[in-house]
Image (spheres, grey):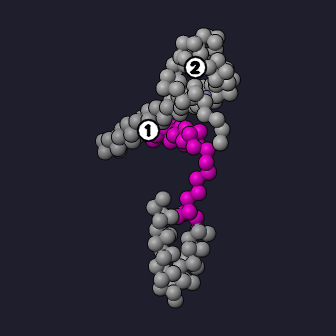
Amino acid sequence: MPRRCTVCDHPERHGIDETLVTGAPYRSVAKRFELSESAVYRHKTEHLPAHLLKAKEVEEAVREDDLLDQVRNLQAHALDILERAEKAGDLRTALAAISQARGNLELLGKLAGELDERPVVNLNVSPEWLELRAVIVGALEPHPTAHRAIIRALEGVNNS
Ligand SMILES: [Zn+2]
């Protein structure tokens, strides 16, 4: 169990971090917040960099989320224009809207990829999975309890 850091646990940790970031000497920070100099020094060298990194990550994620929202918004508009242009028989505008929507989709895909690098495995549309699922369910048919259980479990997988 690592020793608790009195600075990390301090209610004014953000204020302390900000003061340290401005380059204030740890001795004066310790005095100002009534902490021991060694605790502030250790916090500054060992914990502060991680906090700053985390804050930067959060800030970037928020910015990307915002960007994603804007592209989604644009996409909704493009699709709306496409629908109206099609109804009005305005093929020129419809084509322009399609091209715009395609660009938005590419951008959305790119942004989504950057936001979530985890590989997305969609089991439900994989033919191998559907086949395997049919084999498993079929094999358990003579065993009603297990059969019901596996179907329930598979439904859980589908909904997640
Ligand atoms: Zn700390």
Circle 2 residue:
35
In the rendered view, tell whether residue 125 sits above or below residue 93.
below
What percent of the width, then of the height, locates residue 73? 40, 36
Q: Residues within 10 Å of mark 1 (few under 14, many from 20)?
A: some
Q: Report the number of discs.
A: 2
Local secondary structure at mark 2: loop
The three-letter code of the residue at mark 1 reads Arg
Q: Are marks 1 and 2 in contact (CB under 8 Å)?
A: no
Local secondary structure at mark 1: helix
Q: Nearest the camera: 47 or 89?
A: 47
The three-letter code of the residue at mark 2 reads Leu
Taking the image in four quarters, ligand 1 sits in the one at top right
On whether residue 34 falls in the magenta region, the answer is no
When asked about the image quadrant of residue 75, the answer is: top left
On whether residue 122 falls in the magenta region, the answer is yes
Query: What residue do we see at 60% from left, 30% from top?
Result: 5
Give the magenta range: 98-127
User: Where does the N terminus fall, quadrant-wise?
Assistant: top right
User: Could you tell me if residue 56 is visible in this image?
Assistant: no
Magenta stretch: helix, strand or loop mostly = helix
Query: What residue do we see at 49% from left, 81% from top?
Result: 147
Circle number at residue 72: 1
What percent of the width, then of the height, locates residue 151? 48, 74
